[in-house]
Amino acid sequence: MAIFRIAITTAVVGILMTGGEVRGLADEWSSLGDRPLALPDLRPDQPCPINTGRLAVPSQPQIFGGGGFWFGEGPVFLGLFWKAADETQAVFRLDPIPRSGNGYRAKTGWAIDPSYSGPILIRARALGLAGTPLVFSASGRPPEPALHLKAPNVSPATLWSFWPSSMWVPAHGCYGVQLDTLSTTDVVVFEAT
């Protein structure tokens, strides 16, 4: 009987802890979502202030498709998989990208430095008057206007976390992506030509 009570107590504590962790993570994402988008305003005659990539993400078996150059200041880095592998600028052509629904389904990747643990919120929109939001999909989920990730997602946690995803780009133009973590807000600007 004592073993049965221990098993039930352990199960109840596990359920309560899991529920608390889920509520805590939802609260953290909500606080990240309260941050305003800090994307640059772009006038029609202004050139797109695209980012330059860097070799910030190491080669590890779970990370693929980045072509070497990643965008952002960290701890979250964006990989634009349709960009030419030797191109350091955040620019890619829409022509070869498959059209799906209301946009071009551009494969993207997200690599997170192992020094960061916690929630990540990713949002994006067109820069300029229209400000059309972009939508994302990862892990087989339907497209949403924000991507919610939690690092680490690998074992051991000393490895970089990685998520492949899709980002729907509606048309040619200049776009800003905001990467929010508990301690930072980073912006990456890319151009789809």
Image: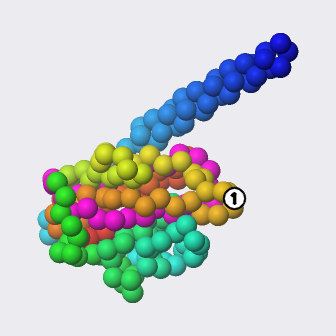
118 horizontally vs 140: left or right: right
Counting labels gives 1
Looking at the rendering, which quadrant does residue 157 occupy? bottom right
Q: Main secondary structure of the magenta part?
A: strand
Three-letter amino acid code of the residue under disc 1 = Pro
Q: Nearer the viewer, residue 153 or 30?
A: 153
Residue 127, visible in the rendered structure? no
On the image, the x and y values in percent for residue 155 come to 66, 57
On the image, the x and y values in percent for residue 28 come to 52, 37
On the image, the x and y values in percent for residue 70 come to 46, 72
Q: Which residue is mark 1?
A: 156
Does the magenta run of residues contain 128? yes
Coloring scheme used: rainbow
> Residue at point 42% right, 37% down?
34
Q: Nearer the viewer, residue 114 or 11?
A: 11
> Residue at point 68% right, 28% down?
14
> Residue at point 52% right, 61% down?
162
119 horizontally vs 52: left or right: right
114 horizontally vs 97: left or right: right
Where does the C terminus fall, quadrant-wise?
Answer: bottom left
Query: Seen from this angle, which residue lies furthest right?
Result: 2
On the image, the x and y values in percent for residue 130 come to 15, 53
Residue stretch rendered in magenta on the structure: 102-130
